[in-house]
């Protein structure tokens, strides 16, 4: 059994927990404090509003503990706003967790009304439906360690750097569990070792 937390401050928390429930040998649990963070093998940072989640991370004293666990190798997956939280650089703004060597641009695909879905191949995962809602994209991968997993309209929308996975889209808003299974495999690999 692998324990996967979902940061539960704001955003698409329930949707991620529902996806995790569908996976065998996976226990999903909401993470709202440091104690819960210590018990998980990996964590998902959901989509939502990155500015709000960033402020709540400070208020709930979770920012430093999260940065520490990520630096120690705990698998983390940021979806949409979560990808923004992970980025070392945000165009025109201060970084939040700043752990992943990518530069992101917020709301780059347009406004809420410009939300869209496509089907595209994601490296190591397959062809899956991708849902974009006021999504960012990564302008650049800033280290050779960053592996680009998917591009849409010529822009980076999925990337991995060691224990960090970032997607600009929302797999939790589709029926397809492939990305969640991929992340669960990352968590299984490091389980007990970190
Ligand atoms: N536009 C949001 C932000 O900048 C992200 C949107 C989302 O997570 N769906 O934080």
Image (cartoon, grey):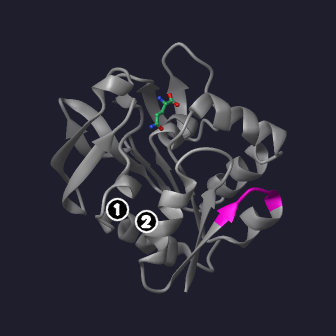
Mark 2 CB lies closer than 8 A to ligand 1: no
Q: Give, as a single range, the part of the protein colored magenta.
A: 30-34
Q: Is residue 6 left or right of residue 144?
A: right
| Quadrant of image for the C terminus | bottom right
Image disc number at residue 179: 1
**Of residues 174 and 109, which is closer to you in this image?**
174
Which residue lies at the image location 51% right of the left edge and 38% below the top edge?
A: 81
Vertical order, 49 against 34 (above or below) = above
Q: Is residue 15 left or right of residue 35?
A: left
> Which of the 4 image quarters holds residue 133?
top left
Residue 73, visible in the rendered structure = yes
Residue 163, visible in the rendered structure = no
| Quadrant of image for the N terminus | bottom right
Mark 2 Cα within 10 Å, few/some/many (few <14, many 20+)?
Answer: many
Circle 2 is placed at which residue position? 183
How far separated are the C-alphas under marks 1 and 2?
6 Å
Asked if disc 1 and disc 2 are in contact, CB closer than 8 Å, the reply is: yes
Vertical order, 59 against 5 (above or below) = above
In magenta stretch: residue 64: no
Q: Position of residue 65 (x, y in %)?
A: 77, 52
Q: Position of residue 89 (x, y in %)?
A: 52, 26
């Amino acid at each position: 059994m692998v324990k996967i937390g979902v940061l539960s401050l704001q955003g698409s928390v329930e949707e991620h927990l529902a996806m995790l429930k569908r996976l065998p040998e996976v226990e999903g649990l909401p993470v709202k404090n440091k104690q819960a963070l210590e018990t998980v093998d990996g964590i998902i940072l959901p989509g939502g509003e990155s500015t709000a989640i960033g402020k709540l991370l400070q208020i709930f004293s979770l920012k430093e503990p999260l940065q520490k666990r990520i630096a120690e190798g705990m698998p983390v997956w940021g979806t949409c706003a979560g990808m923004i939280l992970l980025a070392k650089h945000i165009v025109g703004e201060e970084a939040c967790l700043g752990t992943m060597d990518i530069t992101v641009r917020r709301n780059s695909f347009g406004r809420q009304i410009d939300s869209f879905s496509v089907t595209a191949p994601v490296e190591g995962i397959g062809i899956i439906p991708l849902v974009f809602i006021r999504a960012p994209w990564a302008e650049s991968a800033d280290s050779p360690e960053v592996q680009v997993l998917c591009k849409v309209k010529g822009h980076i929308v999925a990337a991995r750097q060691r224990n960090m996975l970032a997607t600009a889209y929302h797999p939790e808003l589709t029926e397809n569990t492939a990305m969640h299974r991929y992340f669960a495999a990352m968590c299984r690999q490091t389980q007990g070792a970190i």
